[in-house]
Amino acid sequence: MFPTNSLPKKLYLVGVVFIFLAVYSQYVIRYGSITGYLVVYGIPVLVVSLLFGRQLLHRAGKNNKEAAKFGLGLFGVLTVLSLFLSIIALAIIVHFYPHAANLLNKPNPVLNVSSNVAWVMIPVSILVVGPAEEYLFRGFIYGGLLSISKGKYWIPLAVVSSGMFASVHAYYGITYGIASVLPFIDLITFGLAMSITYYWSGGNILVLALIHGVYDATDFLGVATTSQIGQAAQLVMIFVCIGFAAVYLPKKIVMRQTTNPSVPPETTPETQPPPDPPQM
């Protein structure tokens, strides 16, 4: 069972409000690069650490092997699912809005940087972005929901938290309009993979941060070098993760199906002790 700690709803709401205010402030206030990271990531991480940090860090590095197996496997499976859903969504969108596909030709607002900046963003993705986003969205937002619900409804709550994770990437909606459905599908499925791993591993954040950071880094690798190299790195990662899924996820599913409480054995009448011999 996922370990839960009591987190008052009011404190959870305070943390969520701080996270979203900090993230959305960048659409109103122009920050410099360093100031932007301090506001968007630094302030929420500080607030969350004060509210729930001890509980998050206590489990952040536990069950690393399990987190790696399931995290990579789920990432591979749900990335493939995301691809199929995106193809279906694009076909539907183009049917009703024929020119929507042209919107996807716009440059990715995150990756619209020079190659020199992209080289810097590779380690920043691994050391800052991945850890901060997993700490906030899997650790606090999803973990907080699990705490409030006492570990119940973990699948619906994974969907809710993944939707919240996708919603902070509003710049995709601003850039791509109706076609932003595609990157949002990718964000939600990625969030689901990380959330389920967080639950199955008992609250591991370390491995999720690495998966998240490395995957983001491959995008910047494509900007720093060539798009073909970046895409090749992503494909290698996805294929490796699919291999993990093929090996470990079936075992996990079977194990979960066999963890139901066993039926108690048939009871038999207790053997009565022999009567005391008659007293002489």
Image (cartoon, grey):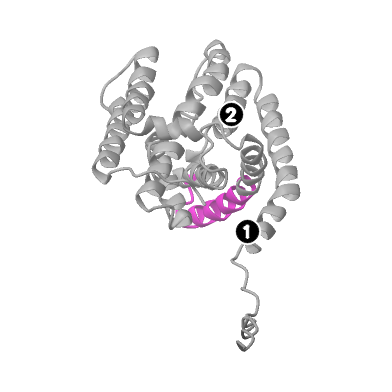
67 is higher (above) or lower (below) than 108:
below
User: Could you tell me residue 162's position as x and y percent?
Assistant: 45, 46
| Image position of 76 (left or right of 2) | right
Q: Which residue is mark 1?
A: 256
Q: Does dot 2 land on a helix, a strand or a loop? A: helix
94 drawn magenta: yes
Q: Earlier in the sequence, mark 1 or mark 2?
A: 2
Query: Which quarter of the rendered picture does the C terminus lie within?
Result: bottom right
98 drawn magenta: yes
104 is higher (above) or lower (below) than 276:
above
Type of the residue with mark 2: Leu
| Image position of 165 (left or right of 123) | left
Q: Which residue is mark 2?
A: 210
| Image position of 91 (left or right of 252) | left
Image depth: mark 1 or mark 2 in front: 1
109 is higher (above) or lower (below) than 142:
above
- Mark identifier at residue 274: none
The stretch in magenta equals: 79-100
Q: Residue at x 38, y 37 (%)?
A: 168
Q: Does dot 1 land on a helix, a strand or a loop? A: helix
Type of the residue with mark 1: Arg
Q: Residue at x 34, y 14 (%)?
A: 35
Q: Quadrant of residue 51?
A: top left
Q: Nearer the viewer, residue 99 or 171?
A: 171
Q: Within 10 angstroms of label 2, few (less than 14), some, or many (20 or more) residues?
A: some
